Image (tube, coloured by chain):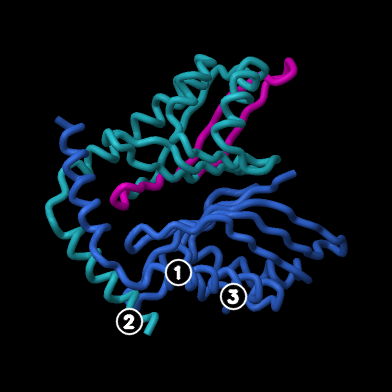
Chain colours: A cyan, B blue
Amino acid sequence: MKRRANMVAGVALAVCSLAPVPGLAGDAEDIAAIWDAYEAARVAGDADAWLALWDEGGVQMPPGMPARGLDVLTVGVPKAFAAMPASAMEISPVETVVMGDWAFSRGTYTADLTSGGNAVHMDGKFMTIFRRQDDGSWKIYRDIFNSNS
Amino acid sequence: MKRRANMVAGVALAVCSLAPVPGLAGDAEDIAAIWDAYEAARVAGDADAWLALWDEGGVQMPPGMPARGLDVLTVGVPKAFAAMPASAMEISPVETVVMGDWAFSRGTYTADLTSGGNAVHMDGKFMTIFRRQDDGSWKIYRDIFNSNS
């Protein structure tokens, strides 16, 4: 019975997705623009611009620490940007899938930071969930990443 | 104009989500059952059972290496399970969101492995995208994880 219920749900949602849905190509462009803004904010050390990319319920899941919400990011990120300035960051999405008012994007990134006077080159990959806001824009809702090496 | 198109899409999809959609509670249960099966397969060292949880286009994004598809997993996972047996694994989802024929789940995990004769305790977090199959079941489509320490 559970299986049948799932199939009914699948059919109903498939019908919805067959209806003309303008703006979806634009959604992928909008999300690419968020990655551009993310890179620019990180290299500029502009924590406010970076934090503005996040949903108010956003959660970041970085390596080496537990998941942390936007309240913790708001306190910690300005300090982290000041302590570890970045000279370059490049985010290369390989896949962006829009699922109604949700989307995910995954890909690879590189960054060049200075930490404690030492140059650090980062080479990793990420997967991110975006949530559509009431005004139609997208914000980062969940973000996790790790190193390739 | 792009903004208006996005808002139209948002309205259309909101109408869809207001329609009765049976089975969504069951979907979250089905995904929890996949995590149970994932733990059991890992501890049993049953690579076939573990690989059967994946979508045919699945991609895993583990720490310390580039992303790898199911073709690479099919060759590598039986060797990895044999080389690094696990005595325990516990996956604790903290959030599962169903988005039509897609879902994401995130949470924490612990595992106790033996690697090269040494006991290894893992304590990390994960985020996973599931894709609904033609038969209504769910499979792992994208999976990324990292350490908390």
Q: Return the residue nearer the eye: B19 or A24.
A: B19
The residue carrying mark 2 is A4
> Percent from the top left, x then y, of residue A24?
22, 44
Q: Real-space Cα distance between discs 2 and 3?
A: 22 Å
With A94 as the anchor, is B47 left or right in this view?
Answer: right
Counting residues from the start of the chain, the first of labels 1 and 3 encountered is 3
Q: Real-space Cα distance between discs 1 and 2?
A: 17 Å
Where, quadrant-wise, is the C terminus of chain A in this rendering? top right
SS type, badge 2: helix
Chain identifier of the residue bearing label 1 in the image: B
**Count of numbered labels shown in the rendering:** 3
Query: Are labels 2 and 3 on one chain?
Result: no
Q: Looking at numbered disc 3 in the image, what kind of residue is underneath it?
A: Ala
Q: Which residues are magenta?
A: A98-126
The residue carrying mark 1 is B139
Report the residue at 20% width, 58% height from top. Answer: A17
Q: Real-space Cα distance between discs 1 and 3?
A: 12 Å
Q: Are marks 1 and 2 in contact (CB under 8 Å)?
A: no
Neighbor class of circle 3 (other Cα within 10 Å; few <14, some 14-19, many 20+) is some
Of tags 1 and 2, the one toward the viewer is 2
Q: Residue furthest bottom?
A: A1
Neighbor class of circle 1 (other Cα within 10 Å; few <14, some 14-19, many 20+) is many
Instruction: Determine if the magenta segment contains residue B114.
Output: no
Report if residue B62 is visible in the image. Answer: no
> Percent from the top left, x then y, of residue B128?
51, 57
Q: Quadrant of residue A12?
A: bottom left
SS type, badge 3: helix
SS type, badge 1: strand
The residue carrying mark 3 is B37
Vertically, is B57 above or below A65? below
> Percent from the top left, x then y, of residue A29?
28, 35
